[in-house]
Structure formats: structure tokens, C-alpha cells
Amino acid sequence: MVVYCCVLCTYIPNYNIMTGVVYDDNFITHKCLWDENYSENPQRYTSVLDRCNSLGLIDRCIKISSRQATKEELLSKHTVKHIDLLESTEQYNDEQLEKLSSRYDSIYVHNSTYRQSLLAAGSSIELVKAVVDDRIQNGMAFVRPPGHHAMESEYSGYCFINNVAIATQYLLDKTAIQKILIVDWDIHHGQATQQMFYEDPRVLYFSIHRYEHGQFWPNLRESDFDHVGNGSGTGFNVNVPLNDTGMKNEDYMAIIHYLLIPLATEFSPDLIIVSSGYDSAIGDPKGEMLVTPACYAHMTHKLMSLSCGRVVAILEGGYYLKSLAESAALTLRALLGDPCPVIGSLKQPCKSVMETIGNVIYAHRHYWDCFKYNIFYKENLPKIHYNFFDEKPEIYQTRNMYPKIDTTDFDIILNNIITETNLFNPKIRVGLISKVIELSNSNFKNSDIYQYLKSKIGNLHVLKERQFTIEEFNIVYSFEYIKEILNKQKYIDEEKCTIKNNNEFIQDNPMFHTFSFSVGPLLQIIDSIFSNEIKSGIFVSSISNLSKNDVSCSLNTSIIGANYAIKKYYLKRILIIELNENVTQIYSNDQILVISMHSLLNSSKAINGNNHINISWSKKILNEAEFTTMVQHLILPIAYEYNPELIIVSSKFYSNINNNINGIQMTPIMCGYLIQWLSTLANGRLILYEQDAHNNSIYRNKCLLQCSKALLGEPISKLRVTNLMNFESKDILLINIKNHKSNWKSLQF
């Protein structure tokens, strides 16, 4: 429904801007006067701030001033009667407050509620306004009461004023923002936000919520997948109802990869607002889900790859304080651009969530191109199950609603998770290095490619160059092995090789001499990463490490680097992505997984195995739509299941009229997105190894620029795809999934 093309953002971002936060200690005044165990309490706010401060996150942010919303701003989404009634409660006594509260579902009113609700809404506006004004890149609002259940003229679910809706409407009315994506990952459906934008095509509302066929609060039929919007807003309301408890990281990430990213890419929002509730987090008594705090960092990072990085998270629910605080802190940490913590090996998504994903695709198949030929598309109309038929009471319970829960067991579990979570965050995000033969550390900064990158994103950290030493070679390979390789290539005389010392024999060989110059810089990046000097690295090379013979494949530079990291740093899982000529034979081990992508028309016979995945297609060029679908449905699920400790992406940025890399139509922006999608893994430890850089073409420079920005955490231009999927595309994906699903649980859906 939307036509895409790869274009630059309409604004030029300031790369010195930071993450903004808004908070105010007045947010602790609103509390329940008649029930000390009430779930929505001031400790929710203080626990989040305390954890963010303990990690030093708040001091790294720009403080955005809080303020109260004006009545004009409130009237954009609420009625006069709704606002005036809340204002009148400033003068109520305790008995009157409780009596009024009993008229609404899950509500308590305090004398400070009106002013604090104004403060929450106004502060949310100030934060999104700061992003649009380019004072900050992204931000997070620590506000309460929450807002996404506050309807036009009814208080509900701890909410009085809809903070997200009012901030969204402000942007649409007062700024040049034209399209906003609201992602609501609170465990409860934000029915009020849905209602407020149900007919507005400028707002794509995407909600992941516990539903259980209507049995879970707010128990509404309209929370199901078939409520897709109305009028001109048809297709712009996306409900992802969860009909079971115990959902894990793999279930949420399946929703992100299979639904949210394709939709958001097609919608192409100018800004993203997250209704950021944390009651899906592990241990929360309301959600009963098992999402770990680190998963929220991954979901946040995925959103940051969209809308030129303009993302705002506004606090909603979350009622297990330890889990709430850790999850919110890791969300803020992701917004600051810190590496995503490892979330462990993600396995097969549960049957229930895959059924929901299929239902959502069926409901939206006519409105979004990304779903027309989706592999989860169902031909038959999904059955609708709604099992809640209770009528609303006239008087709602106000006391003893939430008995105190013993969190001892979950405290132990979460403490273990926190202890085991490595918050890896070197001061230097990217190290740049080149080959040794023509350039030195000093004159590389004078090279055309470095000057180009510097003009776009400022100085990059340049690593000291070095060669691959004989001692390092011995770490990776035995003498017997290399002698066999060289003998096959006729580099040696079998009789003469016994005369020389092993090391002298290898050092004097022209093959080793060539490789020592091309491998050394890669090892320097690996050493710099695992000494915590840098997070990631880019190796700009002009030497091809891959020839069309078995020997060269055996001495593939990426494989040498991976084996070096295994031997020296005891790594157990290294992922190599090869966007090059088909690698038909790779001498590696079970600690290395190689994924190579290639057109069968230009490659030799594909070889698959437990540690080598060939993703192939029988057409000349894989277009961008097909490639992104392949990444989201195949590469990322496998990568998340494999859970690598290091990623090496090997590519050749050839300059050609079609901008294709080994049979893949790749614009520079697409290159950046691939790196950004992969960099959520392995604590951000990713190396881009560029091969065969024969010249400083504009295309090559732009590819390196977008990849550098992705690793730096700088916003990348919007990803828009001009081509569409078709039946052939679907078959290509299904064939590849079929070829590999027996070895990967993440593909067994």
C-alpha cells in the first residue's frame, strides 16, 4: 500500500545530540490513601530512577524540563467534563475520593492526582518536542500515573490522562510530523489509545498484549487481532493478542521480526513512541510472562533502526519493582546506544504466538504489501474466540484488590539474571583499520575513504596496523595442516620441505607473506574488542582473501580470524556472514557457524552442514524486499538461536550500476541496516571485513558510511524498499527454511 524508495531523511541530524530524559520528584505524590498494597504506587517511579542512577545512565542524558499540560492540550483527546471532574478532586476528602474511585475500573484518586496527571502529560509533550526540535535524538519519560487506558471521558486502569495519545496529537497538530508509530508492549491492551486513533491513518498503533480470548483485563472484544481500524484508518490498528501465559524472549522477538519490523518499514514513521510498560517482564504478578530485562533492550534497539532513530519511550505499567527497574534501565541504556546485553539462545516460538502471528497477517493481508506473500499467511478465516461475558458492575472494588505477593523466588532468579548479564560498553564504539601494505597508521587518516567518513561523522578511532605473525599462525593452524595445503597448491616440493625449520618454511612462503598482510589487521580488531578497547571494528582491505579454489577457501581470512579468537579468547560460538562468492568448502569447526548468501546462477554447488548454511536462490538478483525478508525470517532467527559471542560480516562493496553484492541488490542504506540488525547480538561485538576495495567509488564510500553509522549508534536514513515480494520470493524463502529447519528449532514453526 506504500511505495518505497531509498532516500535520505528529510532533516540532517546533529550527531552530537544525545538521549533525553524527563522526570520529576512530584511523581511520588499520587498514591492510594486506603490500600498500602495497591499495585500502582510511588515506589514504581523511585525504583526506576534509583536503578538508572546506579548504572550512571541519568548523568549521561540531557535533562528535559517537566511541565504541566495545558487544558488546550488535554482537550485534544479528552472532554471538558472529564478534565473538570478530575480537577475538582483537589478539594475532596478521603471519603469522597474513594467514592469517586469506586465508579471506575481499577482507579484510585488522590488530591494530587489532577496536578500529577497534568505533569505526566506535559512532560511527555516536552520530550517528544525536544526530539522533533533536534535537541535530542531519542528519549525516555519516567512519568506516572500511566496513561494508555485513559479514554476520552472515562478513567480506567490506573490512568486518567492519556500521555502517549496527547503527545502524539500534539506532534500531529503543532509540528511537521506526519506519521507516528505507537508501539505498546505493556501487558494490558491500550484500548484508549486504540480508540483515539482508530480512524487516523497518520498513526499506526501496534499493541502486544495478553488477551486469552477476552479473559484478561480489559476483557474487550476490540482487543483481538481482527480489529484493524476504521474508515481511512483501516489497516492502521494492529493488535497482537497473546492467548497464553509464560511467553518468553523468543515469542516476543518472533513478533518483532515477523510483524513489527516489516510493518514499520513499510509504514516508514517520522517518529516512534513506545507505550513502555514492563508488566510482561519476568516475575510480574499481572503479566505472568517470562520476558527478561535484556529483551527490552533488543526490542528498543530494533525500533531505533527505524524513523532515523527518533524513538521516545513513555513509562506505562510494571508492578514487580525489581523487574520493572531493571527493564526500564536497560531500555534507557539501549537508547543511549550501549550494546544490547546477550539474551541467551532463543529457540522455537510457542505454538500460540505463531498462531497469533498468522492471524494478524491474515487480518492485514489486504492493507500491507509485506503481508501479501507472507509465509505465515493463512488461506482459511481464523476462528474468533471470545470468552468473556461479564457485565460491568456499578460499583468497583477499591480495597484489598492486590494481596501482598512473596517475590522471594523471583528475586533470586532476577538477581542471577542481573549478575550474569554482561553490560559490555567500551568507550570507543568503532575501531577502523586498513591493510598494512600501502598504508600506515598515520597516513591512513589522510586517505580518501577516511577523509570522506570524517566529513560525514567526525573522527573515527584508527587502530594500529600490524601483520599476522608466525606465532599467531601457529595458534590457529598446525604445521602439518598448512604443509598439506601448500603442497596441494604446489607451493612446495614435498622432499625439500623437510630441510627447513617449520616456521622458516612458512614465513618464507609467498602464500603466507600475502596472507600475513591481509589477516593481521583483522586480528588487531579482535584483540582490541576482547581487551575492551572497542565495541566493534571495520577492516578496510584491498586484498581479496577468497579465490575460486579450495586452498583459498581453506585460508579464508574470516575463518583464520575466528579460529584465532577461539584459541586465544576461548570463544565457543562465532558467526560469520559471507556476502561474497559461494564458499563451497570451509575448514572450520563446530565453534564457527558460516552463513553464505549467493545466487545459484553464479555459484558452484552449495554445501550445507551443521556449521555451514548456504542461503541461495535460482534467480539473478535478490531484490531488497526479498533480502530483508530473508534476514528477518531466516538469518536473524538462526543468529538469535546460535547466540554468537562474535560476528564477522565479510562483504565486497563493488562499484557497479546495479549496486548488487554477489547477487543481492544492496543500496548503502541496506548495508547499514544489515549491520544494525546484526549488532544487537554478541554484545555488539561485530567486525565488518570489506574485501576487494579496488577504488574509492561513491558507492563503496556510502556503504562504509552507513555501516559505520550503524556501529556508532548514529541514525541511519529510512529504509524504504521499492520492490515487492511475489510468489517466487515466497518459494525462495520456503525452500531455504525447509533446507535448514531440521537443524534449527527457531525455524520449526
Image: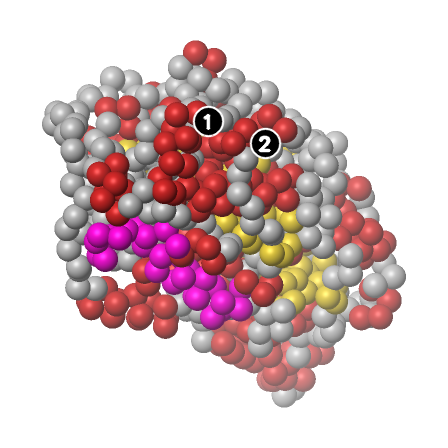
Q: CA distance from mark 1 to mark 2?
A: 13 Å
User: Amino acid type of disc 1?
Assistant: Lys
Up-down: is 459 above or below 112?
A: below
| Residue named by callout 1 | 77
**Quarter of the image where one finds residue 589:** bottom left
Q: Is residue 748 left or right of residue 70?
A: left
Indicate the position of residue 236 as horizontal and vertical percent values: 44, 23
Is residue 399 at least partly visible in the picture? yes
User: Amino acid type of disc 2?
Assistant: Leu
Residue at image location 16% in from the left, 29% down from the top: 394
Magenta span has 28? no
Residue at image location 17% in from the left, 60% down from the top: 405
Up-down: is 421 above or below 606?
A: below
Comparing 205 with 42, the one in front is 42
Comparing 623 with 386, the one in front is 386
Up-down: is 76 above or below 98?
A: above
Label 1: state its secondary structure: loop
Q: Which mark is residue 171?
A: 2
Is residue 692 at least partly visible in the picture? no
Which stretch appears magenta?
29-57
Q: Residues within 10 Å of mark 2 (few under 14, many from 20)?
A: many
Label 2: state its secondary structure: helix
Comparing 505 with 747, the one in front is 747
